[in-house]
Image (tube, grey):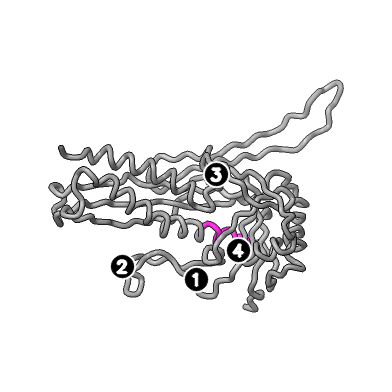
């Protein structure tokens, strides 16, 4: 019996969206997109609320009237990425297509999609901190004797700006190793929730630490188009002149991240006009934003010296 390709595509789309959020180290940022309006395509509408502060209460006149401004700002997801994959009909019959395709697409997402999304999001946060030039340290090489102080300095800097909620720390393996040596088994764990999954992660001052590969902690990345000569492999590489961060501290409420898979298309060998094979089209929109009034909440510690130009 022919497989229901429409139902299969829908199933893959739902599953891959959930897996992308759970496997991406920055998947926790998508929780802030709950009130973002998305109707398909590349555009989203982000709510912006402006309020006024307290006024003096008068026993005769009562309260001073306050103003509330709520408006939606249209933003565009600039990252429109995709790939086509084929599974030859001789290698995959109808009975095991779902299992084989699930393995292939799951591996593709784990090895290529989520690392690129992470690297893009973190590079945007780092760039915002560099541009703001308030909460940034250059030229620090992680060391057992100083790493804890550097992290606590960053936490204090963000707290002093009034961000009293949960902070999240993305940290390279090198920096985390020095921290573990400094604490000598005294490091505490906290529960960190992401995509409906709770995990135990190390923490400093109750701020969860997400160990993040160095190749996702660049201030800029170059994204390959998959077609130009030298870029056929797709994915991303470290950007020209990019700086490497040791750790990033950011309130959980600051980044607004969205990752949406467009309608996934699956063509069976009888429908596919190009080859006797199953064809799968994978396309994903994603983006990250930081609202203007929260740009001062990102703290970055960078290994490289501050650029002179």
**Residue position for label 4:** 172
Q: Are marks 3 and 2 in contact (CB under 8 Å)?
A: no
Q: Which residue in the structure is indicated by mark 2?
A: 227
Q: Residue at x 73, y 68 (%)?
A: 144
Marks 1,2: beta carbons within 8 A: no
Q: Is residue 189 left or right of residue 289?
A: right
Q: Which mark is residue 49?
A: none
What residue is drawn where x is 80% and y is 34%? 55
- Viewer-side residue, 124 vs 152: 152
Q: Is residue 124 magenta-colored? A: yes
Of 151 and 181, the residue lying toward us: 181
Residue 237 is inside the magenta segment: no
Residue 194 is marked as 3
Alpha-carbon distance for marks 3 and 2? 34 Å
Mark 2 nearby-residue class (10 Å; few <14, some 14–19, many ≥20): few
Residue 213 percent across, percent down from the top left: 54, 63
Query: Most extreme residue toward the bottom, as rendered?
Result: 308
Whichever of labels 1 and 2 marks the residue nearer the N terminus, that label is 2
Rendering coords of residue 192 (x, y %): 61, 45
The part of the chain drawn in magenta is 121-129
Horizontal side, residue 54 vs residue 270: left or right:
right
Q: Could you classify mark 1 by the number of other residues whose Cα lies within 10 Å: few (under 14), some (14-19), or many (20 or more)?
A: some
Q: Secondary structure at mark 3?
A: strand
Indicate the quadrant where residue 111 lies. Answer: bottom left
Q: Nearer the viewer, mark 3 or mark 2?
A: 3
| Label 4 SS | loop
The residue that mark 1 highlights is 239
Magenta residues, dominant SS class: helix
Which of pointers 2 and 4 indicates the residue nearer the eye?
4
For marks 3 and 1 on the same chain, the one whose residue lies earlier in the sequence: 3
């Amino acid at each position: 019996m022919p497989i229901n390709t429409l139902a299969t595509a829908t199933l893959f789309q739902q599953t891959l969206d959930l897996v992308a959020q759970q496997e991406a180290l920055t998947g926790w940022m998508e929780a802030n997109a709950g009130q973002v309006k998305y109707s398909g395509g590349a555009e989203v509408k982000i709510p912006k609320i402006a309020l006024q502060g307290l006024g003096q209460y008068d026993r005769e006149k009562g309260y001073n009237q306050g103003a509330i401004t709520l408006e939606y700002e249209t933003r565009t997801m600039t990252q429109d990425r995709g790939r086509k994959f084929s599974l030859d009909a001789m290698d995959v019959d109808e009975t095991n297509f779902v299992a084989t395709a699930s393995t292939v697409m799951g591996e593709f997402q784990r090895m290529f999609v989520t690392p690129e999304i992470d690297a893009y999001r973190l590079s945007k946060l780092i760039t915002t901190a560099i541009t703001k030039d308030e909460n940034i340290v250059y030229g620090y090489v992680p060391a057992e004797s100083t790493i804890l102080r550097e992290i606590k300095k960053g936490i204090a800097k963000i707290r002093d700006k009034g961000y009293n909620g949960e902070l999240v720390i993305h940290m390279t393996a090198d920096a985390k190793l020095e921290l573990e040596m400094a604490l000598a088994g005294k490091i505490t764990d906290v529960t960190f929730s992401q995509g409906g999954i709770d995990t135990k992660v190390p923490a400093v001052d109750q701020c969860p630490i997400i160990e993040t590969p160095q190749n996702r902690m660049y201030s800029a990345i170059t994204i390959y188009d998959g077609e130009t000569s030298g870029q056929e492999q797709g994915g991303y590489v470290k950007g020209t002149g990019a700086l490497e961060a040791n750790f990033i501290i950011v309130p959980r409420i600051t980044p607004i991240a969205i990752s949406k898979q467009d309608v996934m298309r699956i063509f069976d060998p009888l429908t596919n006009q190009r080859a006797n094979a199953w064809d799968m089209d994978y396309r994903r929109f994603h983006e990250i934003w930081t609202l203007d009034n929260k740009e001062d909440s990102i703290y970055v510690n960078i290994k490289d010296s501050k650029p002179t130009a």
